[in-house]
Image (spheres, rainbow, N blue to C red):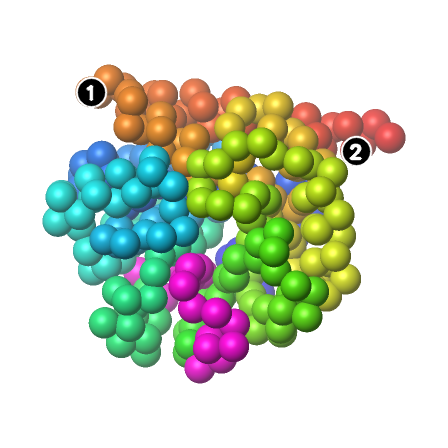
Amino acid sequence: MSRIGQTFTALKAQNRKALISFITAGDPGKGLTVPLMHALVDAGTDIIELGVPFSDPMADGPVIQRASERALANKVGLKDVLAMTAEFRKVNTSTPVVLMGYANPFEHMGYETFAEAAKTAGVDGVLTVDIPPEESLGVSDVFKAHDLDPIFLLSPTTPESRVAQVAAVAGGFIYYVSLKGVTGSANLDTEEVARKVAMVRKHCDLPVGVGFGIRDAATAEAVARIADAVVVGSRIVNEIETAPEGECGARVKHLVADLRRGVDAASKQTENK
């Protein structure tokens, strides 16, 4: 079982839901990513999503787009992201790390070369935003051959037939996008999300994480009641962007600890039923 699978199994045994936190590698500074990864874990993150900077992140909203721009200005590329993961692994051998990015950097390195290097660095899963499931079979096979979970996005407009197609090739967990639009959008409709998550579960035994539109403990709690994992990206990146110099880590820890309290409050409600 992968490190991602082990994490979800352990949380389920404790009647807890996962908190998955996203940051962009190299934002706000090249040397700050590994300390931020440890800060996320210290504050209650179960799985880290590490964004690979990309020049045209079409699925991301302006907050994460600006994070990519800052990271690219810091000259952070895929090899740097892998080196940061390896550095993180010198201290933390248990928290799963998922690389989230676009196909071009992985394809440029070569999927086989990338997968081998990613596994060596300590990566556990890869979410490639712009590879559709019908074009992903060969890539998913390469990732699985190197014990990397291929993770896929589903959206509110994904038809049920395509959900089944994704379920057949996915690993680790399914990432359900709660809103139409890009990351950082607002107006989360949890009743609609609950209906969609139930539909996804008809086709897939993997845990379902829900992201987009989660901004505080209250929204994290609402999503944790209906999903196996709460995924938070733009809100954390916004905290990084607006933190005064030298306060980035402390601000992120404070926010993530608040999100953790929201996620755990949902678990306690389940226990008391």
Query: In this image, 8 relative to 184: left or right?
Result: right
Q: In this view, does 253 lie above or below 14?
A: above
10 Å neighbourhood of mark 1: few (<14), some, or many (≥20)? few
Residue in the image at 80% along x and 32% along y: 271
Inspect the magenta stretch and tell me whether residue 231 lies in it: no
Marks 1,2: beta carbons within 8 A? no
Query: In this image, 32 relative to 97: left or right?
Result: left
In this figure, which residue is indicated by the disc labeled 1?
245
Q: Which amino acid does label 2 sit on?
A: Thr
Res 141 seen here: no
In this figure, which residue is indicated by the disc labeled 2?
270
Res 271 seen here: yes
Secondary-structure class at tag 2: helix
Secondary-structure class at tag 1: loop
**What's drawn in magenta, residue-wise?**
119-138
**Which sits in the foreground, 154 or 252?**
154
Query: In this image, 21 relative to 6: left or right?
Result: left
Q: Is residue 117 above or below residue 261?
A: below
Between the C-alphas of marks 1 and 2, the distance is: 40 Å
Q: In the picture, which quadrant includes the N terminus? A: bottom right
**Which sits in the foreground, 144 or 87?**
144
Residue in the image at 70% along x and 51% along y: 197
Q: Residue furthest bottom?
A: 138
Residue in the image at 50% along x and 62% along y: 151
Rendered image quadrant of residue 31: top left
Q: In the picture, which quadrant includes the C terminus? A: top right
Residue in the image at 79% along x and 33% along y: 270
Q: Which amino acid does label 1 sit on?
A: Glu
Query: In this image, 58 relative to 145: left or right?
Result: left
Inspect the magenta stretch and tell me whether residue 131 lies in it: yes
